[in-house]
Image (cartoon, rainbow, N blue to C red):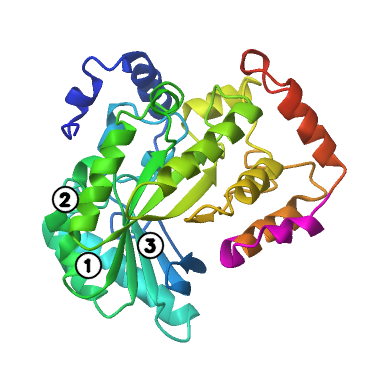
Amino acid sequence: MSKPSPEVYEEGRGMDAHNRVMREVRARNNESHDPREPTRVWLDEDNTPDGVYDSLTIILNTGGCRWARAGGCTMCGYVAESVEGGTVPHEDLMQQVEHCLDHEAKHAEEPAGQVKIYTSGSFLDEREVPAETRQAIAEAFADRDRIVVESLPDFVTRDRVAEFTDRGVETDVAVGLETATDRVRHDCINKYFDFADFEDAAAEARRAGAGVKAYLLLKPPFLSERQAVADMKQSVRRCGAVTGVHTVSMNPTNVQQYTMVEDLYHAGGYRPPWLWSVAEVLESTADEDVIVVSDPVGAGSDRGPHNCGECDERVQRAIKDFDLRQDPSVFEQASCACEATWEAVLERERSYSMPLVR
């Protein structure tokens, strides 16, 4: 398992060039953020092994992902929304939680059965979220049915996860794996760990009695549309074969600020994935023994996953329907003439001359 420090991450991994570029890109950001306000909070529905739940999703504003501080992932701009200066104090983080509970009380008739807690990096990294805060949050949500906490593999330990499972809450550890292909994760995404590290983290979560949710990334930079779709199909199947992994969430890349992807996008070297590609992966993996879902951020916009503009909303609705029902027939009603263009892109686009269509 990789040691959790930026210096160790960089040594001998061939990532120095990516990290240098990413640090230069991130340095353009001069925004500041209130450490007492969460980055984001919303209510939604999610498919889980125990059925569909109302979910309260919380993104805590922390000192930011330590890998992003070293340079970080080519597509991720979340560190730009983080508080500068390192760890946010316990009292401020708990004030953020109170803000989220107030939001829930205002917009929901009753507390959500599931709570999902994210940061710009790893909730289980004690530099981002101190142990005192993690334990207080575990206690605050001990009356819920399910909880999801996100972390890089490095910080997934039996003891930290057990602080939730020991309270009788069904717990899932969500890991931003991005792809099951190590070369794509290292060279296209600039993420330091290997698939074997993900398997080790899944084993740690299982020992604490928790399940695992894998987050995958559809179409990182430097892959053609066809390569990206093929990589996702293979990745879903490899994740589903890991004991304890019950859900795969496929995130189509969107163009976030202060990222390498944004620079490529403005230079004409990147197009977000087609929504047809999302549908293709979901249809092709529907028979796998794992829940596969997708929630395309920015769907229908130029910077988000999109088709021709005429059918985007229709296909997005079908994807949401699939998430809840896991029925691939939902896509039969989402046809559009632009599907032929997408098929041509799959056939003709090459990674050295993409994108073929913007």
Locate the C terminus by quadrant. top right
* Residue 74 at x, y percent in the picture: 44, 28
Alpha carbons under labels 2 and 1: distance apart: 17 Å
Can residue 357 be seen at all in this image of the molecule? Answer: no
Task: Answer with left or right where residue 273 lies relative to residue 10.
Answer: right
Between 200 and 116, which is closer to the camera in this rendering? 200
Give the numbered dot on residue 157: 2
Between 143 and 70, which is closer to the camera in this rendering? 143
The residue shown at (56%, 54%) is 295
Can residue 180 be seen at all in this image of the molecule? Answer: yes
Between 53 and 24, which is closer to the camera in this rendering? 53
Q: Nearer the viewer, mark 2 or mark 1?
A: 2
Which SS type dominates the magenta stretch? helix
Q: How packed is label 2: few (under 14 Cα within 10 Å), some, or many (20 or more)?
A: some
Residue corresponding to mark 1: 137
* Residue 60 at x, y percent in the picture: 32, 56
Amino acid type, label 2: Thr
Q: Which residues are magenta?
A: 323-335
Quadrant in the rendering for residue 229: top right
**Label 1 SS:** helix
- Please report contact status of discs 3 and 1: CB closer than 8 Å, yes or no: no
Give the numbered dot on residue 58: 3
Residue 325 falls inside the magenta stretch: yes
**Along the polypeptide, which appears first: circle 3 or circle 1?**
3
- Please report contact status of discs 2 and 1: CB closer than 8 Å, yes or no: no
Residue 352 falls inside the magenta stretch: no
**Label 2 SS:** loop
* Residue 166 at x, y percent in the picture: 16, 70
